[in-house]
Image (spheres, helix red, strand yellow):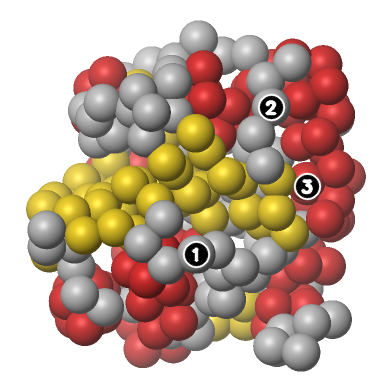
């Protein structure tokens, strides 16, 4: 455990080592070999959202990269990504994917709240379910701002607050009843799981502005009509997510 590592970070590291065991290398490589990038549980195409912009030559830090399939797509699109994750097990899977596909970029084991990266070194910080729920935004948002150049952009996906309010504590999909108060989500330690951070929208706005960001957009994501319920994560069903947004996708930038 690093000198800065908290009990919450250690708990999340252990959780994601276990989650990594649920996925085979075949599953990971399949994501690496996808032709287009998609967002979230229901695979919303980037072409529908147009969030990332021109990636040619862009220096990108992916926070909470997991098996780094998003960074693999960014690299193929011409960016220069660095993929960071607190789980050594997940990054080991990413290394095997690099060997299989030949797509290579730096893989760094690090907590998103304390980034071992130079200030002002990146054009884009991106995170799909990495830093958003799993790191304290009071720490990771200032770190994201620090490593971005003036005018640099932040794009991150996290769970909606409403999903967090309606998911049972032990297991099972979200229902149509509120099961906890909103203030109980920031943070929340799930029984048998990890420690997550789900501020309300107003708090996200305050924290982003406090870190120096200008907010460009908040996309509340709904699945396509034909989308199936996610096979691995029992958070929400596709039917639930058709009625209420299960995911929030934030876009912000630093002033030039």
Q: Earlier in the sequence, mark 1 or mark 3?
A: 3
Q: Which residue is mark 1?
A: 118
Can you tell which quarter of the image residue 168 is in? bottom right
Q: Earlier in the sequence, mark 1 or mark 2?
A: 2
**Looking at the picture, does residue 180 appear above or below residue 119?**
below
Q: Which residue is mark 2?
A: 104
Which element is circle 2 on? loop
Quadrant where the image shows the N terminus: bottom right
At a point 11% along the width and 53% down the height, the residue shown is 216
Q: Nearer the viewer, residue 95 or 243?
A: 95
**Looking at the picture, does residue 61 appear above or below residue 205?**
above
Can the viewer see residue 53 in this picture?
Answer: yes
Residues at discs 1 and 2 in contact (Cβ within 8 Å): no
Closer to the eye: label 1 or 2: 1
At a point 26% along the width and 78% down the height, the residue shown is 211
Q: Earlier in the sequence, mark 2 or mark 3?
A: 3
Q: Which residue is mark 3?
A: 90
Q: Position of residue 136 (x, y in %)?
A: 48, 79
Gap between marks 1 and 3 measured at Cα: 24 Å
């Amino acid at each position: 455990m690093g000198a800065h590592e908290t009990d919450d970070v250690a708990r999340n590291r252990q959780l994601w080592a276990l989650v990594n065991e649920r996925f085979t290398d075949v599953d990971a490589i399949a994501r690496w070999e996808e032709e287009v990038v998609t967002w979230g549980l229901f695979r919303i195409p980037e072409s529908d959202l147009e969030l990332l912009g021109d990636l040619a030559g862009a220096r990108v830090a992916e926070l909470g990269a997991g098996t780094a399939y998003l960074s693999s797509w960014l690299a193929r699109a011409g960016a220069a990504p660095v993929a960071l994750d607190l789980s050594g097990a997940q990054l080991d899977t990413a290394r095997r994917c690099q060997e299989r596909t030949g797509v290579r970029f730096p893989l760094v084991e690090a907590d998103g709240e304390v980034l071992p990266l130079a200030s002002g070194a990146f054009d884009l910080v991106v995170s799909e379910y990495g830093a958003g729920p799993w790191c304290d935004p009071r720490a990771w948002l200032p770190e994201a701002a620090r490593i971005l150049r003036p005018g640099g952009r932040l794009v991150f996906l996290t769970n909606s607050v409403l999903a967090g309010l309606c998911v049972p504590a032990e297991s099972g999909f979200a229902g149509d009843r509120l099961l906890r108060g909103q203030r109980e989500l920031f943070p929340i330690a799930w029984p048998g799981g990890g420690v997550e951070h789900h501020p309300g929208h107003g708090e996200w706005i305050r924290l982003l502005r406090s870190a120096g960001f200008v907010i460009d957009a908040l996309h509340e994501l709904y699945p396509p009509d034909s989308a199936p319920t996610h096979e691995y994560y029992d958070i929400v069903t596709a039917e639930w997510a058709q009625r209420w947004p299960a995911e929030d996708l934030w876009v912000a930038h630093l002033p030039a």
